Amino acid sequence: MNQLNIRALFPSDDGNLQQREQFMGLVKQLMEGVDALKDPESVYLKGEKDRGSHFYRELTAESRIPVAGRPLEQVNEELLKLLHGHPYHTKYFLTNILPMASTPGILGMLAAFAVNGNNLWDVYGPAGAEAEVRVVAMMSELVGYTPSESGGYTTWGGQGAIFTGLRIAINKHDPSIKKAGVPHNLYAFCSEAAHYSLFKSMEATGLGTNNLVKVRTREDSSMDVRDLKEKMEQVIRRGGVPIYVVASTATTDAMGIDNLAEIVEASEEIAAQHSIRKPHIHADSALGGFFAFFNHYDFAGNPLAIGEETLAALAAIQERMRHLHLADSLCFDFQKLGQTPYSTSLFLVKRASDLKLVDLEPDETPYVGHRGYGDYHTSYTLECSRMGSSISILSALLAFGAEGYQRLLAQFVEINLAFRRRLSEELPEAVIVNPDNPGIITLFRIYSDRKNGFAAECRGQRTKAQIQCENRLNDMLFETLGRARGEMFFGDTKKHLYVRTADGAGDIALYAAKLFVISPYTQLSDVQAIVGFLKQKIEETYAAYEALAKKEKEDEKAFVEMELV
């Protein structure tokens, strides 16, 4: 029996040509295999994959570690089989915030993998530490922080940023909480449209989700700051303390952008009135923060010759994003609009000293940091081991530059605007329900009478039963689009705006389908095909809905007749 050469499974330690060529040959095999699976007219890579109801159970039953290792070429073949039927970012990939990883982003990640440093400490990960310091300074300057005073680190997504912001907020209120435990009178606030990350963070810190206060949103999905102030007052009257406010800049569904300046002003006013510390303000800029690349753009001169309508939309977004520097902390999910691989998120704090509030004591980290050597020890992170994802971020920033990001974002906005125009012209029954949100997302909702019922819903003129009926229709549209997502991959949401009901049955969320412009390969010339596809699927949905309604009516009639007999 041939014995496995263990050292052949590793890159060389001396840079020899033989092992390098072997490695590059394996990479070539993998990349050629991926390219062979691509189809620019589909959203899925080629290859059949029957993911039925028993798929994962069957995988569990048959998956075992082999006794003898396989040759790497065979392992590559297994890896390529995993990719069969996998979504891929072609021109028709129009769902949520799942971008294509750019070449510089991938190269940066390869550089990080090549040395495999632990970014916790510069002695173990000097490359990642250096990249992280540079990235923090670059993005601090972009949003208007002072790089010499700000701080930050890469983390596991917007969730990691929101969670650290909450930890800082708790310890700002009382540093002894780290040892004594969390009291039950501390409250956090976010809008109804905010991401669920804060909900999970409240649970994880022990504050509990009952202490998370949801603030009403306006029709543009931005936080109603007047309602924020009222709810802060209510909390204080009950003996609670507002310690944390998360402003969404922008929301995942409608791209609603909270007015950060108003939120900060309201928080300072409440704090002054009640002689309490101002709550820590975190801007959840994981998605929208990248539009800060236009904070220094010359809109009057327009050096990139951006179209007039697109330029106006970008200026409206920038009007909100220019206030990012007012937040105590914020984040950038580079795996979203930064075009880097998962997971490459950046958490920033205006004052680096805030990180000391969640730092460990030297004797709590006996085998890393706090030595006479090494100058960069991130013991304030929740992670004890951190990948050097900052290298991928730095690679993308250097390759794209501010202008590259501006061009890409302008392209996304331009296509979204063109889609909205064509949708309104050819499919007026598909009502755009976030018309006040310029950006890269369009939410649309259909109604059973094929008329625009959105305004009546927003005014509270529809009963709960009526809205539920329309939600059911839109849920059927989700299913119709979902069955055809191999052709075009749309998103959807079951939580676009909470509206009051005419019969006083409480607030209810509106369902809406979603087009999210996220692929660099989606062009203006593709808009007609996208709208044509939607037209067909919406007609199929109406036909299915009418057939279902007819059947339910017949069943109800038969039941009544049976009762009479």
Image (cartoon, rainbow, N blue to C red):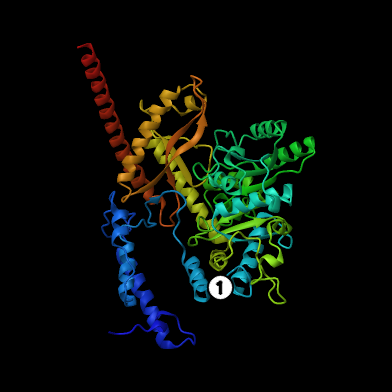
Outermost residue, top direction?
564
Which residue corresponds to the image point at 54% horizontal and 39% vertical from the top-left?
A: 193
Q: Secondary structure at mark 1?
A: loop
Disc 1 residue type? Answer: Gly
From the viewer's perspective, is 135 left or right of 467? right
Image-quadrant location for residue 369 = bottom right
Q: From where the camera sits, is residue 427 visible? A: no
Work out whether residue 383 or residue 366 is closer to the camera in this orientation and state it.
366
Which residue corresponds to the image point at 61% horizontal and 68% vertical from the top-left?
A: 120
Q: Position of residue 8 (x, y in %)?
A: 39, 83
- Pointer 1: residues within 10 angstroms few (<14), some, or many (20+)? many
From the viewer's perspective, is 148 left or right of 252? right
Q: From where the camera sits, is residue 100 visible? A: yes
Q: Position of residue 296 (x, y in %)?
A: 65, 55
Look at the picture and state if 312 lies above or below 357: above
Work out whether residue 165 or residue 510 is closer to the camera in this orientation and state it.
165
Look at the picture and state if 236 lies above or below 339: above
The quarter in which the C terminus is drawn is top left
The quarter in which the N terminus is drawn is bottom left
Look at the picture and state if 132 lies above or below 443: below
Name the residue that disc number 1 marks: 117
Image-quadrant location for residue 347 = bottom right
Image-quadrant location for residue 316 = top right
Q: Position of residue 252 (x, y in %)?
A: 51, 45
Which residue corresponds to the image point at 62% horizontal and 64% vertical from the top-left?
A: 135
Outermost residue, front direction?
180
Q: Position of residue 485 (x, y in %)?
A: 33, 48
Which residue corresponds to the image point at 48% horizontal and 53% vertical from the top-left?
A: 411
From the viewer's perspective, is 321 left or right of 104? right
